[in-house]
Amino acid sequence: MTTIEFPEGFHDHVFTDFAAYLSGLERAGGLVIFKCVDLMSIYRIAPYTYILDVVRDTAGAPRFRVRFAGTETVAALDRDPTGKYLEEINVGPEREDVIDIYSSMLETRCPSASRSGFLVTHPSNLNHFDEHTVTLKRVVFPLTDSGEAIDYFIGALVRVNETSAETGFTRIDFDMP
């Protein structure tokens, strides 16, 4: 089995186990076939995973809807994003950069690793909410039904810490072996 060389800071076991699993699955057109993904096969890291549907309509650019979010993904985001479009989720200061990960992957067809801030809001009393930004790291792979188009994305998401000194958006695309 071929291993993926992750960029510095993305050597967490969640990402390496996730990529190792995906690299062993059947492909069409160079992309992993969606129906071959079985989250029960990776039950130890499935809580960190999420799946996005690529929703295309004739009126505009594709949108990305959350089909599945594992329990650790929900905890990292501090809310359940299932059924929501990415632009409906408050993704913090790098919102457009995060959405662009998926838009550009439609063109490049390459997996991507990224780090970004995410705004978390907690009620502190009846009239006030506390807000802070946490750092999220994600590794995302495109999936296909037919080998022609990218129909889904599968990602693994890890919340780095409660309040992060790391700021700014970082993204690195890489080739699938």
Image (tube, rainbow, N blue to C red):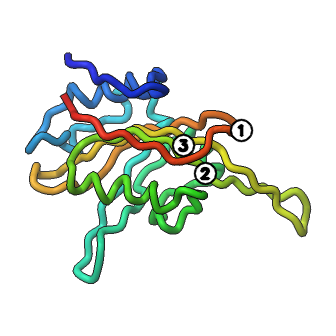
> Real-space Cα distance between discs 1 and 2?
11 Å
| Pick the front one: 47 or 64 | 64
Image: 55 above or below 163: below
The residue at 60%/41% (across/down) is 135
Q: Which residue is mark 3?
A: 73
Residue labelled with disc 1:
162
* Label 3 vs 1, first from the N-terminus: 3
Residue 17, numbered label? none
Residue at 69%, 53% (x, y): give it. Answer: 120
Side of 176 where 155 appears, left or right: right
**Vertically, is 18 above or below 138?**
above
Q: Position of residue 139 (x, y in %)?
A: 40, 38
Count residues near mark 1 (Cα–Cα under 10 Å), then give few for <14, some for 14-19, many for 20+: few
> What residue sits right under mark 2 in the picture?
118
**Amino acid on which the number 3 mark rests in the picture:** Thr
Going by the image, does 76 lie left or right of 171?
right
Q: The disc labelled 2 sits on which kind of residue?
A: Phe
Give residue 94's position: percent from left, percent from top: 53, 56
Label 1: which secondary element: loop
Residue 43 visible here: no
Residue 15 position in % (x across, y down):
42, 28
Examine the image and state in which quarter residue 26 appears. top left
The image shows residue 113, relative to residue 151, as above or below, that is above
| Image side of residue 40 versus residue 82, left or right | left
User: Looking at the rendering, in which quadrant would you find the C terminus?
Assistant: top left
